[in-house]
Amino acid sequence: MTHLVPLADTQFAESIWIMVAKTIVIFAVIFAILPILTVVERKLIGRFQHRYGPNRVGPFGLLQPLADVGKLISKESFRPENAISTLFVLGPLLPVLSGVLALAIIPWGDVKNGVGFYGIDVPIGILYFFAVGSIAFYGLLLGGWSSGSKYSLLGAMRSAAQLISYEVSMGLALLGVIMMSGSLSLVDVVHAQGGVWFIAPQIVGFLIFMLAGFAETNRTPFDMPEADAELVQGFMTEYGGMRFGSFLLVEYMEILVVSGIAAAMFLGGWMGPGPGWLDPIWMLIKMLALVFVFIWVRATLPRLRYDQLMTLGWKVLLPLATLNVLVTAILVVVT
């Protein structure tokens, strides 16, 4: 007998085998995109800086990710003498788990022929996103603290302060969209944008979310936790081999997650012209457009000082996000 799994807010149930099959397909696509993103970023940054970028391995340097993976696999995954073994090994695994769980709620399309084009749809999708996203924080903190290095510890402490500072603003930025759609489910939020995408009435919330997203993913100009000029490689300093590669992989997974949440909450998700089978393609195009913004900012802006980072988070973004929530609440009640 085939077991059916009820899905939230969709009024139907899916076979467990359908859920397993679409999960495999979604993650196969995502993990095929990740190595491509690495070489595309390096090529784009090279062009921004008037150089070629990777151009030796394969045609036009497109096989560079395979060379990088081979190099990391062949390197020794050593452990420092002063490291706490169990926590040192656990450090890179928690961020990977966090990224995989977060990718599961990104909606790629609507329900078609009894199959939802997403991993899971839960009625508390946004809360789920913040809950599983916080798991990565523990991985960075454990990895830095258990390494037995002052550089790693300083990087972990910076990461902890940075994530706490900007996660509040990120949550408030999404609260306006939640009030307008009346749901925490990402699928319901996309459905609520049938007339106008929420980026129009919530442009302030979108900008705050993207700025907080740069900080959450430790990307330029908020890459203080791994500032190479000060902390060697921050919390990753003592890691080598594929453990080091796991942290690099997680960075791009987090970029895709933030881009996917932003596309679903502000840019209409899978909605676009054309037949229904184009829905996942429209969602992917919107995500990659936001990923390009991440790359563009990295090539353009310098790293902020740590005091500037904290000032921006607590004195600028937080009051602005709170004001946006108050204005949105008033407009929702009045209209």
Image (tube, helix red, strand yellow):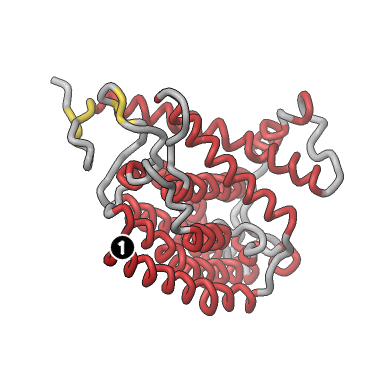
Q: Residue furthest left?
A: 1
Q: Nearer the viewer, residue 113 or 75?
A: 113
Mark 1: amino acid = Val
* Residue 84 seen in render: no
Taking the image as shown, residue 294 lies to the left or right of residue 187, namely right
* The C terminus lies in quadrant: bottom left
* Residue wearing tag 1: 332
Residue 145 sits above or below residue 70 on the image: below
Q: Can you tell which quarter of the image residue 217 is in?
A: bottom right
> How many residues crowd around disc 1 within 10 Å: few (fewer than 14), some, or many (20 or more)?
few
Q: Secondary structure at mark 1?
A: helix
Residue 284 sits above or below residue 302 on the image: above
Total number of numbered discs in the rendering? 1
* The N terminus lies in quadrant: top left
Residue drawn 37% across and 56% down? 177
Taking the image as shown, residue 185 lies to the left or right of residue 59, namely left
Residue 117 sits above or below residue 169 on the image: above
Percent of width and height locating residue 193:
38, 45
Percent of width and height locating residue 309:
61, 73
Q: Nearer the viewer, residue 90 or 135?
A: 135
Residue drawn 43% across and 36% down? 270
Q: Can you tell which quarter of the image residue 118 is in?
A: top left
Percent of width and height locating residue 225:
61, 65
Q: Can you tell which quarter of the image residue 16 is in?
A: top left
Residue drawn 22% across and 25% down? 15
